[in-house]
Image (cartoon, helix red, strand yellow):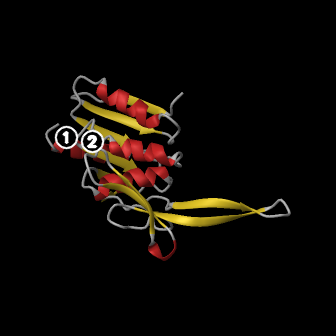
Amino acid sequence: AVPLEHKGLGDGIHYVKIRNFARGVGYELRSKLKSQESLRGLILDLRDNPGGIFDEAVNVSDLFLEKGTIVSALGRNDKVLSRQEATQEVIAQNLPLFILINRSSASASEIVAGALQDNNRARLFGEKTYGKGSVQTIVKLSDGSGIKLTVARYRTPKGKMIDGVGIVPDVLIPRTANKDDTFDAALRWMRKKGL
């Protein structure tokens, strides 16, 4: 089962929680969005999402972007090793998009949040994210052990480092014990937009 939870909140506003970026999550989200008759706003919940497959983070970001950089991988001396660009096919081009993040949103979650924030495509609510944005490889040694080497670090479209820094939300809402203030704030903002 793809780790995606969806529910309609009424008035064409939808809520989707992505638990992790497993294989197929981008395709699943695309299908969900395309099957909605009236889609007037989306709250995308990436809280407590530890990450997952890099390509799926790119696929999810690409659903909302017509053009622009999604993420870059920089090696030594800040040399760009790779850059992922948005493709023209967009599922939800002008759809109001609100993303929920917290300090347990990491890796692929941070790529999506950073890409959509830097391209002015989404408003981020919650806490600063975890800050895991490195590309690692394991070099095997002759005695059977290995060394984990960081070979690149991810940067957002505007060049912000993710690793060790995290993504800062547009609307900072500290975590509270029981009430879901982050979700409530995002929904209030969306309603304020006349949705």
Quadrant showing the C terminus: top left
Residue 7 drawn at (x, y percent): 36, 28
Is residue 53 depicted above or below 149 in this figure?
Answer: above
Compared with 107, 180 (above or below) is above
- Circle 1 residue: 191
Percent across and percent down for residue 174 are 40, 57
The residue under the point 48% across, 50% down is 108
Place residue 92 in its image quadrant. Answer: top left
State the SS at label 1: helix
Per the image, label 2 sits on a secondary structure element best described as: helix
Name the residue beneath numbered marker 2. Answer: 187
Seen at 38% across and 35% down, the residue is 16
The image quarter containing residue 193 is top left
- Point out residue 171 in the picture as x, y percentages from the top left corner: 30, 57
| Residue 142 in view in this figure | yes
Marks 1 & 2, CB-CB < 8 Å contact:
yes
Crowding at dot 2, Cα within 10 Å, few <14 / some 14-19 / many 20+, comes out as many
* Horizontal arrangement in the rendering, residue 92 relative to residue 83 (left or right): left
Hey, what amino acid is under mark 2? Leu
* Observer-nearest of 125 and 116: 116
Residue lying farthest to the right in this orientation: 143
Q: Position of residue 37 (x, y in %)?
A: 24, 22
Q: Is residue 165 above or below residue 93?
A: below
Identify the residue at image location x=44%, y=46%.
57
Local packing at callout 1 (Cα closer than 10 Å; few below 14, some 14-19, many 20+) is few
Quadrant location of the N terminus?
A: top right
Q: How many marks?
A: 2
Q: Residue furthest bottom?
A: 77
Amino acid type for the residue under numbered disc 1:
Arg
Residue lying at 31% horizontally and 23% vertically, measured from the top left: 35
